[in-house]
Image (cartoon, rainbow, N blue to C red):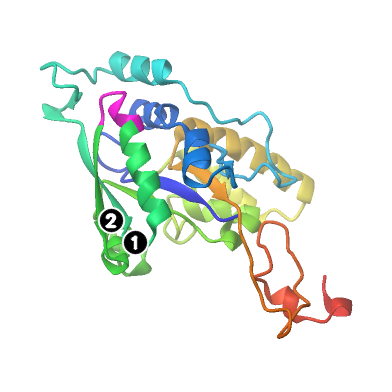
Amino acid sequence: FTTQMINFDASKRPFDDLAVRQAMQLAIDSQDIVDTVYLGAATVGSPGWVHPDKPVYNPAVTPAYDVAAATTLLDDAGYLDSDGDGIREYDGQPMAFEMLTNSSDSLRLRIAELVSGFLADVGIQVTVASVETATWEEAVWPGFDINNGRNYQMASWGWSAPIQANTIRVAELVNSDPGTGFLNLTGFAHPEIDTISAALLTEADTAVAASLLADLQVLIAEQVPFILLAYPDGAYVYNSDVYADWEFIAGQGIVSKVSMLPASARP
């Protein structure tokens, strides 16, 4: 349930334009990322956030890779390459952006390089900037408080397994209220998503919550608050002479406090 994704500042041009966000999502071949970076040891990301192995996954939401559709979206929205240099323009300037990634993560760096190539195919230039982890975090999530704003154009990002494991936490990623969406690092805002995600956090009826999640996945896939690329598999090595009673937890592996409980006490 860990994630690899691309973030952008959705409060600023041109990422505030739905056509640009949708085009970028369509232009990226997530299956190629899974095959190239993870040698197949990952699951292609759902554009609706929820992992396909989750019971509340909405099967109507599926990833799509379509360069022609991405090109058409950008053309129709007026993002054209008027000078023929291979880079489209917006507001009189080239669609050329910096994508931050943390230098300590070689896999994430390779993902950023591949994404740069995919976006170049539709006329968007992305320069990958590999920086120290502290610099990367401070740009995307200053002081780990979204009230401090953002200081980046694009960035590779990802969340640890608990954010995906407790599915209703998707509200924290997409709600525009800083109190509710305190993990909304892209500055994304959409009134219907705000309403559904807020209701999800307080809904006690599991059937109703599942219905809300189904609707929310459709909206997230359509509105693209971020681009979810993949859910990497985990590989776990341990010394059984020291401790061998690890319990594999779906989506989280053996790195779980549940494993430290005796079998009779595990949920």
**Disc on res. 141:** 1
Q: Residue at x 83, y 81 (%)?
A: 262
Label 2 packing within 10 angstroms: few (<14), some (14-19), many (20+) = some
Q: SS class of the residue under badge 2?
A: loop
| Segment colored magenta | 118-124
What is the quadrant of the C terminus in the image? bottom right
**Amino acid identity at mark 1:** Trp
Q: Is residue 64 visible?
A: yes
Q: Is residue 186 above or below residue 64?
A: below
Q: Nearer the viewer, residue 135 or 193?
A: 135
Q: Earlier in the sequence, mark 1 or mark 2?
A: 1
Residue tagged 2: 150
Q: Residue at x 25, y 41 (%)?
A: 12
Q: Label 2 amino acid?
A: Arg
- On screen, residue 255 versus residue 92, left or right, reads right
Verify CB contact (< 8 Å) between mark 1 and mark 2: yes
Answer left or right for 60 relative to 78: right
Q: Position of residue 243 (x, y in %)?
A: 73, 82
